[in-house]
């Protein structure tokens, strides 16, 4: 059923929400691939570039982020960890794509997608990706990668008296 005269469709409102978030956050790399598909790149400390796709449908909005290639190590152990981690997330879930790569997925109602909700989803993708990446890499690829080098924290400044 079309929206009443003077009201935008849920899809048009969701498109406006995505555009509003991107306008509010120019630091997010973004490329619009079609009317309803965007490729975003979030900047992280551990994962320097976090790829995210936003795909809007008539009823469902799908936000996905690649996290990790399919494991070379103990797949069952990695999958157990992912399932347990799903219990601690709010909007996003760990999943496997068609190549058994680990991805993060948020599935939302297009009608419920607001700029605030999209910001919350992107924030959770950032936090989950940053906090999970290194432990999952070491579990999926045991002995292959050394611990990641982190930028040193600045020394605390003591106030002058």
Image (tube, rainbow, N blue to C red):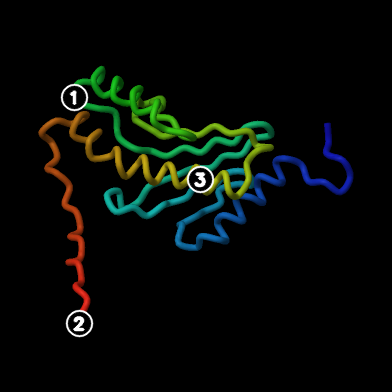
Helix, strand or loop at label 1? It is loop
In this picture, residue 68 sits left or right of residue 111: left
Disc 2/disc 1 C-alpha distance (Å): 56 Å
Of pointers 3 and 1, the one earlier in the residue sequence: 1
> Which of labels 2 and 1 is toward the front?
2
Kindly identify which residue carries mark 1: 73
Residue 80: x %, y % from top left? 29, 20
> Which of labels 2 and 3 is toward the front?
2
Residue 42: x %, y % from top left? 41, 52
User: Residue at image x 30%, y 48%?
Assistant: 47
Query: Would you say the residues marked 2 and 1 are in contact, meaning their CB atoms lie under 8 Å apart?
Result: no
Helix, strand or loop at label 2? It is loop
Mark number, residue 134: none
User: Residue at image x 33%, y 23%?
Assistant: 84
In this picture, residue 140 sits left or right of residue 90: left
Of pointers 2 and 1, the one earlier in the residue sequence: 1
Kindly identify which residue carries mark 2: 161
Task: Name the quadrant of the C terminus.
Answer: bottom left
Kindly identify which residue carries mark 3: 120
Residue 101: x %, y % from top left? 34, 30
In this picture, residue 148 sits left or right of residue 18: left
> Which of labels 3 and 1 is toward the front?
3
């Amino acid at each position: 059923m079309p929206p009443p005269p003077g009201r935008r469709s849920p899809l048009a409102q969701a498109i406006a929400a995505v555009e509003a978030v991107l306008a509010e956050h120019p630091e997010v790399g973004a490329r619009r691939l079609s009317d309803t598909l965007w490729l975003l790149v979030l900047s992280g400390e551990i994962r320097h570039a976090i790829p995210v796709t936003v795909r809007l449908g008539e009823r469902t909005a799908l936000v996905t982020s690649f996290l990790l290639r399919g494991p070379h190590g103990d797949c069952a152990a990695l999958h157990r960890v992912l399932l347990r981690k799903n219990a601690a997330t709010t909007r996003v879930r760990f999943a496997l794509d068609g190549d058994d790569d680990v991805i993060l997925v948020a599935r939302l109602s297009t009608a419920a997608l607001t700029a605030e909700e999209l910001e919350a989803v992107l924030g959770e993708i950032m936090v989950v990706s940053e906090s999970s990446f290194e432990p999952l890499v070491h579990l999926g690829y045991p002995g292959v990668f050394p611990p990641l080098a982190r930028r040193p924290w600045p020394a605390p400044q003591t106030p002058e008296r």
